[in-house]
Image (cartoon, rainbow, N blue to C red):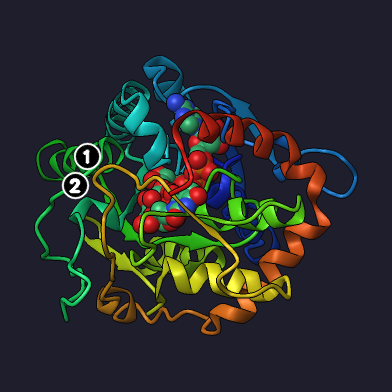
Amino acid sequence: MRVLVTGGAGFIGSNFVLRTLATRTDVDVSVLDAFTYAANPASLLGVDGKEVCEVIRGDIRDAELVERLVQRFDAVVHFAAESHNDNSLVDADPFVSTNVMGTVNLAKACAASDVRLHHVSTDEVFGDLALDDPTRFTTTTPYRPSSPYSASKASADHFVRAWVRSLGLAATISNCSNNYGPRQHPEKFIPRQVCGLIRGRRPRVYGTGDNVRDWIHVDDHNDAVWAILDRGEVGQTYLIGADGERSNLEVVGDILAGFDRSRDDFVHVTDRPGHDRRYAIDPESMEELGWEPRYRDFTAGLAATIEWYRDNEDWWADAYDAAEAGYAQREREL
Ligand code: NAD
Ligand code: DAU
């Protein structure tokens, strides 16, 4: 099977590539990535310093390139996106062009060449839940996105479904909850605090810190994507989650404990406008495919992640400094 991975130099995509190469000898992987600020070329280098697979430097907004490329593959796994909510509140344009138009280009090209598409989406398309709401997101929850990022992902999902129903595309969609693990950009919550602590800086918690995210290890997400590629039904949507609900205060406390610091040794900073309160996934659609998470112990997964950032400062140092320069302009201590 020949698989093209878009966004394969980013967090989840690079973990998908490395895990696939390690576990699936029947699969030939290539990456298509525009290498935005969010990519890290080092993520795709082997111990010999060479790229672990074919890496094509190109943009999914380039319709001609996409059309030409996908013909060489049996399937496209589509991770490429602008992925950070905070950035989408500063400038939504790249989110619209990459997340919406880039996905439309892939849908068109895959339909034209009869190539299977798996579109990687997010639980944020459903908006948020109240903290005391006993329900979780299911495959029938209506879309109610809150940020330009989640609106662009919701839009992309609708386009993929339209191409499946009306234009002969063989596609599946997955909506996953918050991922953690190695090689996540230090602009995101967990690596930002971990890298900050390594640098001697106290963690920064938006607003009250009561907001809840449903954490899943990146390898569990990527194994779920393979379960969908192997056994999923074309036209279906799958919700991926690992029963990992935790408040930001709990997570930051666990991170601080991992550094032998008091659980409340952090600062509250300006809240994110429109900050979603809670995400929670009902993973029934994935359980029906026989998938289940392997990383059930969040504290152990987090400890391994902290270890990875301690051991790989070269990987994150420049990206951390650049992200902090941006945060410094819009964030203040409460
Ligand atoms: P990331 O920001 O770490 O990586 C995105 C990658 O896409 C980067 O390598 C970047 O260079 C590439 N890219 C961006 N624009 C591109 C373009 N126009 N053409 C080609 N490549 C381009 O993102 P991530 O956290 O790995 O997320 C990957 C996917 O998973 C996204 O679609 C995101 O919406 C989705 N998702 C993420 C999470 C999460 O917790 N991180 C959860 C659920 C779903
Ligand atoms: O739910 C899936 C989504 O998870 C993905 O679709 C997105 O691509 C991914 O970025 C993530 O979105 P979030 O906005 O939930 O992730 P982020 O890491 O930015 O923030 C997680 C929580 O932590 C959120 O409630 C905001 C808060 N936060 C974030 C940062 C960066 C802080 O309290 N302090 C911070 O410094």
Q: Distance between the residues labelled 2 and 1?
A: 5 Å
Dot 1 surroundings within 10 Å: few (below 14), some, or many (20 or more)?
many
Q: Which residue lies furthest to the front in this view?
A: 334
Q: Is mark 2 within 8 Å of ligand 2?
A: no
Question: In the rendering, at what x and y percent does residue 158 appear?
Answer: 16, 42
Describe residue 270's horizontal placement relative to residue 306 as left or right.
Answer: left
| Residue visible at 41% across and 17% down in the picture | 62
Vertical placement of 27 versus 134: above or below?
A: above
Instruction: Name the one closer to the observer, 167 or 291.
Output: 291
Q: Position of residue 45 (x, y in %)?
A: 78, 42
Vertical placement of residue 307 versus 94, above or below: below
Q: In the picture, residue 108 is in which quadrant?
A: top left
- Tags 2 and 1 touching, CB below 8 Å: yes
Q: 189 left or right of 88?
A: right
What residue is drawn where x is 68% and y is 34%?
321
* Category of crowding for the residue at label 2, using alpha-carbon neighbours closer than 10 angstroms: few (below 14), some (14–19), many (at least 20): many
- Residue 145 is at least partly visible in this image: yes
Q: Position of residue 70 (x, y in %)?
A: 44, 32
Tag 1's secondary structure? helix
Tell me, for residue 224, which label it has, or none.
none
Residue lying at 12% horizontally and 63% vertically, measured from the top left: 141
Residue at the disc numbered 2: 145
Q: Which residue is drawn at 41% across and 78% down?
A: 291
- Give x and y (percent) for residue 253: 55, 73
Type of amino acid under label 2: Pro
Answer left or right for 254 relative to 122: right
Question: What residue is disc 1 on?
Answer: 151
Labels 2 and 1: the sequence-earlier one: 2
Q: Can residue 52 be seen in this view?
A: no
Q: Is residue 334 shown above or below 245?
A: above
Q: Is residue 330 depicted above or below 172 in this figure?
A: above
